Image (spheres, rainbow, N blue to C red):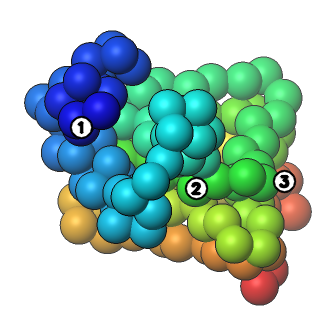
Amino acid sequence: MTLDLLLESLGLNLASSFIYDLIKDIFQKNRELSLSDFKDELLKYIEIEKAEIASDSIIEFLAETGDIVILGSKIYSKESIVMTSSVGTKFQVKDGSSNTTEQTSIELGVGASITGQNGAEIRQSKDGISFRV
């Protein structure tokens, strides 16, 4: 199966450079992937772009089986925002994103990023902002 046919079967096109880069990385690691294995590899990566996410209590991002990348998004939680990575995964907040609670704020300019990987955590709460590596 060609890459074009594979993408078509998944309902994807190459309009997004993130999709292209992700697919290229997957195929560089293993050129003999089945369609099922390819879908599993795609599920290991979540990109949230230009989103507005709000909660009255807690927002928690857990990069447990794959990476989470947040770009140009506004995240607000009244009480707490937690971002955690597991071994072999990472979370990344970048390019104009902000994380805000009633007591704390993390604002990132375009081109700036915060990355946590292999068990790192950022916790924003009424007690302040804490980092764990």
Q: Amino acid at mark 3?
A: Lys
The spot of residue 34 in percent (x, y) is 51, 39
- Where residue 49 sits, quadrant-wise, is top left
The spot of residue 13 in percent (x, y) is 20, 25
- Residue in the image at 48% along x and 48% along y: 33
- Residue in the image at 72% along x and 24% along y: 55
What's the mark number on residue 67? 2
Circle 1 sits on which residue?
Answer: 3
Comparing 11 with 73, the one in front is 11
Instruction: Give the CA separation, mark 1 to mark 2.
Output: 23 Å
- Residue in the image at 77% along x and 54% along y: 64
Mark 2 surroundings within 10 Å by alpha-carbon count, few (fewer than 14), some (14 through 19), many (20 or more): many
Of helix, strand and loop, which one carries label 3?
A: loop
Q: Amino acid at mark 1?
A: Leu
Of helix, strand and loop, which one carries label 1?
A: helix
Circle 3 sits on which residue?
Answer: 126
> Which of the two discs, 2 and 3, sits closer to the camera?
2
